[in-house]
Amino acid sequence: MNTVAENRPLTMAEKLELAQAAYDKFRSSCFWYLRDDVKVTEDDLETIIRGLRSNGNREAFLIAGKLCR
């Protein structure tokens, strides 16, 4: 069951934390062309979202959707 809290937009700090976790988890399948030691910044969010959507599985695609809110 979804709650309002689960559907609220993420703060920038939450987006960066989620994007870093996604980068770490999906690095080999979605971000093989980037360095291993990337620390995700606000400027990297578009690249992370694009990589998750283009090269990821369903889980990655759903994370990209959360990052877009």
Image: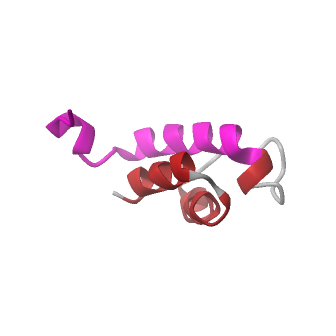
- Which of the pair 14/67 is nearer the observer? 67
Q: Is residue 7 above or below residue 61?
A: above
Left or right of 69, for residue 28: right
- Asked which colour scheme the image uses, the reply is secondary structure
- Up-down relation of residue 14 to residue 43 (above or below): above
Residue appearing at x 45%, y 45% in the figure: 15
Q: How many marks?
A: 0
Between 41 and 3, the one lying in front of the other is 3
**Residue at the spot x=74%, y=46% of the render?**
27
Question: Which residue occupies 26% across, 37% down?
Answer: 6
Tell me the quadrant of the picture where the N terminus can be found. top left
Name the residue rendered at 28%, 49% in the picture: 9
Q: Which residues are magenta?
A: 1-27
> Does residue 27 sit above or below 5 in this rendering?
below
Whole-percent x, y for residue 5 in the image: 20, 35
Residue 11 belongs to magenta span: yes
**Left or right, residue 3 beside residue 49:** left
User: With respect to residue 34, does 40 lie above or below?
Assistant: above
Q: Main secondary structure of the magenta part?
A: helix
Q: Residue furthest left?
A: 4
Name the foreground residue: 53 vs 38: 53
Quadrant in which the C terminus appears: bottom left
Question: Percent position (x, y) of residue 24?
Answer: 69, 38
Relative image position of residue 55 (x, y in whole percent)? 67, 61
Residue 46, percent across and down?
Answer: 55, 65
Where, by quadrant of the figure, is residue 44 drawn? bottom right
